[in-house]
């Protein structure tokens, strides 16, 4: 009964249906509250009420159902406290995203606490101690956007100071809509495969979209879907991939189906541009120096927003070139929030993340070393990944290349790039395929390019520094990145 534009309240008399195991009312126009009488259907195992206009609180009686295994009430207007019993303790079978007024529940759901009559300190009197990673991103933003990028693109200073945001509009789509949009999940529309699903290009109502279909047979995919929905529900920023809608339904075989629909990025992933195929290594198949600087600033801007502009902060946990997508004008959009984590007000990871000490924290070569020492994550991990990505962008070397063995790492390889005279030896040769950076007769331009490359590669090395002591990181970045390592010709007119 999904996708039929049914209107009105959900009739409590549904409780009288005998033998009902699955009730799917997704993608209709139902309103009113969820009747607690549904818990009396002793055979009911799956209840799907997503993408309606339901309001009021979630009936506690649903938590006492002994048969309910899957409950999807996402993208309604529900409010109040989430129950803590039964299905509401089953993270893999529960979906409540898109209800911005919900609170409470078990800690693993990571919802804000419900209001109480107790009065706390005014927000204006609270002192927030920034995390090490937050400081790193802030200083990296200054180092990149302040003295490098504005030298090349002074006309965009206003844009960097006041990043544009986008409002997420979530129209209702059904499984049939997704099936039609992707031409039956045709191989011809396949864009790529990831850890938890497959991405297809498609068209929804004449809108070019990228459809991420989750492989629910893969362990952790339900949680990944919920985490990504929850993270994307909280963010509004021009440098993050825009989500269009999601689909939480069942397919024609009666199996659970989950998908996210994003705005299609016409130029694909950054990874394909840094490491182009042999056939595409020409003037049109590589990124210029100015394009790479554009992308670098977008990344810093996005991370600064996630760590410092969101409340609570969001840790991406998997920043790498293949998760960075490019618009038609070659600007960066960070995507894939499937393993993103949300920090609590104290700056530490919420308790949901401590359930598994082996939960995936990123990709080999880009994940911060300390993630292997325990289950917690921090903003520092994203900054480490940013550093590796910056080095890769400007050297063309992947951290997992065969050359990096026997103690040789990408960071060690890049350290010599901190000296302008040596930077040409490690810089990506594809940068010079563009005329704008290939004027060998202009000594001033050559010197400027070398100083710029040296500074940004050194910034990548500093961001991926393995020193974990807060004092060391703060002093190192403040003195070396903002003072000592800044080329004079880059910051002076």
Image (cartoon, rainbow, N blue to C red):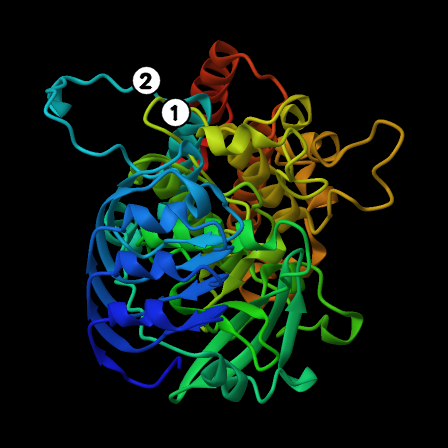
For the question of whether residue 148 can be seen, the reply is no
Q: Is residue 77 above or below residue 106?
A: below
Residue in the foreground of this view, choosing between 421 and 457: 457
Which of the image's four quarters has the N terminus?
Answer: bottom left
Q: Quadrant of residue 279?
A: bottom right
Residue identified by numbered label 1: 347
For the question of whether residue 49 can be seen, the reply is yes
In the rendered image, residue 23, in percent from the top left (x then y), is placed at 43, 71
Residue in the foreground of this view, choosing between 43 and 379: 43
The kind of secondary structure element at disc 1 is loop
Which residue is found at the position 24% from the left and 74% from the top? Answer: 30
Q: Is residue 445 above or below residue 326?
A: above
Which of the image's four quarters has the C terminus?
Answer: top left
Verify CB contact (< 8 Å) between mark 1 and mark 2: yes
Residue identified by numbered label 2: 129
Q: CA distance from mark 1 to mark 2?
A: 8 Å
Disc on the earlier residue, 1 or 2: 2
Which residue is found at the position 62% from the left and 79% from the top? Answer: 253
In the rendered image, residue 77, in percent from the top left (x then y), is placed at 22, 59
Q: In the picture provided, is 381 more to the left or to the right than 79?
A: right
Q: Is residue 152 above or below residue 216?
A: above
Which residue is found at the position 60% from the left and 66% from the top? Answer: 434
* Dot in front, 1 or 2: 1
Which residue is found at the position 86% from the left and 42% from the top? Answer: 403
In the rendered image, residue 461, in percent from the top left (x then y), is placed at 61, 31
Q: Quadrant of residue 368?
A: top right
Q: Residues within 10 Å of mark 1 (few under 14, many from 20)?
A: some
């Amino acid at each position: 009964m999904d996708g039929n534009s049914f209107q009105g309240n959900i009739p409590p008399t549904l409780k009288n249906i005998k033998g009902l195991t699955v009730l799917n009312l997704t993608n209709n126009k139902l309103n009113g509250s969820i009747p607690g009488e549904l818990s009396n259907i002793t055979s009911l195992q799956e209840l799907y009420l997503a993408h309606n206009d339901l309001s009021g609180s979630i009936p506690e009686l649903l938590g006492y159902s002994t048969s309910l295994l899957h409950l999807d009430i996402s993208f309604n207007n529900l409010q109040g406290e989430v129950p803590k019993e039964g299905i509401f303790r089953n993270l893999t079978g529960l979906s409540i995203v898109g209800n911005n007024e919900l609170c409470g529940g078990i800690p693993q759901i990571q919802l804000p606490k419900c209001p109480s009559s107790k009065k706390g300190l005014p927000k204006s009197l609270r002192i927030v101690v920034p995390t090490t990673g937050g400081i790193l991103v802030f200083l990296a933003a200054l180092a990149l956007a302040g003295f490098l990028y504005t030298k090349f693109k002074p006309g965009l200073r206003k844009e960097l100071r006041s990043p544009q945001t986008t409002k997420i509009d979530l129209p209702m789509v059904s499984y049939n809509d997704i099936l039609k949009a992707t031409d039956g999940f045709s191989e011809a529309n396949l864009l790529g495969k990831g850890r938890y699903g497959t991405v297809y290009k498609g068209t929804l109502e004449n809108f070019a979209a990228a459809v991420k279909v989750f492989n629910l047979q893969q362990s952790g995919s339900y949680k990944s879907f919920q985490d990504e929905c929850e993270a994307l529900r909280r963010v509004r920023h021009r440098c993050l991939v825009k989500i269009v809608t999601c689909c939480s339904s069942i397919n024609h075989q009666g199996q659970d189906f989950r998908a996210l629909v994003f705005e299609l990025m016409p130029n694909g992933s950054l990874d394909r541009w840094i490491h182009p195929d042999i056939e595409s290594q020409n003037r049109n198949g590589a990124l210029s120096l100015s394009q790479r600087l554009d992308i670098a600033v977008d990344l810093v801007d996005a991370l600064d927003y996630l760590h410092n502009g969101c409340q609570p902060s969001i840790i991406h946990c998997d920043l790498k070139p293949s998760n960075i997508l490019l618009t038609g004008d070659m600007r960066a959009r960070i995507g894939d929030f499937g393993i993103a984590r949300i920090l609590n007000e104290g700056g530490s990871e919420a308790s949901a993340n401590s359930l598994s000490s082996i939960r995936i924290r990123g990709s080999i070569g880009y994940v911060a070393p300390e993630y292997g020492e325990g289950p917690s994550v921090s903003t520092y991990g994203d900054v480490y990944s940013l550093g590796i990505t910056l080095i890769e962008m400007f050297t063309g070397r992947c951290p997992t290349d065969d050359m990096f063995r026997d103690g040789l790492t990408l960071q060690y390889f890049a350290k010599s790039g901190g000296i302008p005279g040596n930077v040409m030896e490690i810089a990506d040769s594809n940068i010079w395929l563009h005329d704008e950076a290939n004027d060998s007769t202009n000594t001033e331009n050559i010197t400027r390019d070398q100083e710029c490359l040296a500074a940004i590669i050194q910034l990548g090395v500093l961001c991926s520094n393995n020193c974990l002591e807060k004092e060391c990181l703060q002093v190192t970045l403040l003195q070396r990145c903002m003072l000592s390592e800044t080329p004079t010709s880059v910051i002076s007119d």
